[in-house]
């Protein structure tokens, strides 16, 4: 029976569990393991489907790296695919490997190199008191495959799109071409549009990776909006926040500038300041060392030999003496 360990982890709420114990899988590289595990489906079904998984869960399997510079290798399994690289999953892997002592942790910073299916990535982890506080990664080289390509679609007409790589392949579109704003209320519409666009883009454009020929398809569709300049001269996305009353009716819409004023007002409240100061004062509990009780030598009640007890109420020097006394009493009808 093969023994494996699964460690629960997440990055900003996105689950990225880490599996240790499958390193003996006979593959030459994480890339080869990723392709084989996706075709086989055995471990994907085991970790990603119910009752151990779901559409919300990712899973990372630690494997042997092929690059001699790498400290460890890993395969990323997501519900849709086994991608060549994932930022959130690599953060989960680094955190588990360090906190569970699979790799040596150095304080205050630990530098690692992990081999993802797409290649080698660099990691810097901030470590305090044997815990990983922050992780930064240097991703795989990014590039543009197709720039401002005119895609002819059946439902949306001719639209301008681009394809690019940043650890995985993306189809980049402008949200304004579909008369939509990037707000939560339009999420379902974006999902339907993305599904249709990916089918047409993969059949008409495809994708060309110079080092990973297996990645000849587009994985994700990403919608974009133009940036705006705020009062401080910084470029940001235009966003809004809808405020509803207790009956569910729309009360008002806070624009970007109003939202920043409201947030400042919230954090300046006395109740918020009290909570913040309490959190800042909170310290992790420290365990006091257990006091060691001194035990003096005793005389065994059976063999009359001197012995050093492991407990203050010990009467016997060994289990044999205790058993012999029990049997003697049992013969007399008094087990004790």
Image (tube, rainbow, N blue to C red):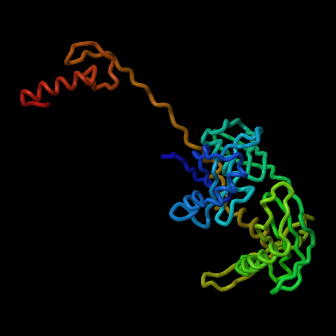
Residue sitting at 71 percent across and 43 percent down?
Answer: 65
Picture coordinates of residue 166 (x, y %)?
82, 59
Residue extending farthest top: 305
Q: Name above or below for residue 331 compared with residue 213.
A: above
Q: How many numbered marks have been drawn onto this rendered protein structure?
A: 0
State the image quarter where residue 167 is shown. bottom right
Residue sitting at 33 percent across and 26 percent down?
Answer: 311
Quadrant of the frame with the C terminus: top left
State the image quarter where residue 150 is shown. bottom right
The answer, for residue 269, to whether it is visible in the render is yes
Residue sitting at 61 percent across and 65 percent down?
Answer: 56
The answer, for residue 274, to whether it is visible in the render is no
Q: Name above or below for residue 86 compared with residue 256.
A: above
Task: Report the front residue among 216 and 292.
Answer: 216
Task: Report the front residue among 206 and 189.
Answer: 206
Picture coordinates of residue 223 (x, y %)?
81, 73
State the image quarter where residue 274 is shown. bottom right
Q: Name above or below for residue 252 compared with residue 96.
A: below
**Image position of 142 (left or right of 56):** right
**Image position of 41 (left or right of 65):** left
Picture coordinates of residue 239 (x, y %)?
80, 74
Task: Report the front residue among 148 and 248.
Answer: 148
Picture coordinates of residue 208 (x, y %)?
85, 63
Q: Name above or below for residue 240 compared with residue 267.
A: below
**Image position of 13 (left or right of 324):** right
């Amino acid at each position: 029976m093969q023994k494996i360990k699964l460690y629960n982890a997440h990055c900003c709420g996105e689950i990225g569990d880490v599996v240790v114990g499958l390193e003996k899988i006979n593959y030459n590289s994480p890339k080869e393991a990723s392709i084989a595990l996706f075709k086989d489906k055995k471990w994907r079904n085991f970790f990603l489907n119910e009752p151990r998984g779901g559409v919300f869960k990712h899973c990372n399997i630690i494997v042997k790296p092929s690059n001699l510079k790498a400290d460890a290798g890993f395969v990323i399994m997501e519900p849709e695919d086994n991608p060549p690289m994932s930022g959130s999953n690599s953060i989960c892997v680094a955190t588990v490997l360090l906190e569970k002592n699979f790799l040596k942790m150095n304080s205050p910073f630990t530098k690692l190199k992990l081999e993802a299916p797409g290649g080698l990535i660099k990691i810097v982890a901030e470590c305090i008191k044997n815990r990983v506080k922050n992780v930064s990664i240097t991703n795989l080289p990014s590039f543009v495959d197709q720039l401002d390509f005119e895609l002819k679609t059946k439902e949306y007409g001719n639209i301008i799109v681009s394809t690019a790589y940043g650890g995985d392949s993306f189809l980049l579109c402008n949200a304004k071409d579909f008369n939509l704003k990037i707000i939560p209320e339009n999420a379902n519409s974006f999902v339907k549009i993305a599904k249709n666009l990916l089918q047409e883009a993969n059949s008409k454009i495809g994708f060309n990776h110079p080092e990973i020929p297996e990645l000849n398809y587009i994985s994700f569709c990403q919608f974009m909006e133009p940036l705006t300049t705020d009062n401080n001269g910084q470029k940001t996305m235009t966003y809004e926040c809808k405020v509803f009353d207790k009956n569910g009716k729309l009360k008002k819409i806070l624009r970007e500038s109003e939202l920043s004023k409201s947030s400042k007002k919230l954090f300046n409240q006395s109740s918020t300041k009290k909570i913040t100061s309490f959190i800042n004062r909170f310290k992790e509990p420290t365990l006091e060392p257990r006091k060691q009780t001194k035990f003096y030598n005793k005389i065994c009640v059976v063999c009359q030999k001197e012995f050093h007890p492991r407990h203050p109420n010990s009467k016997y020097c060994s289990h044999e003496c205790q058993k012999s006394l029990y049997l003697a009493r049992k013969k007399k009808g008094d087990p004790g």
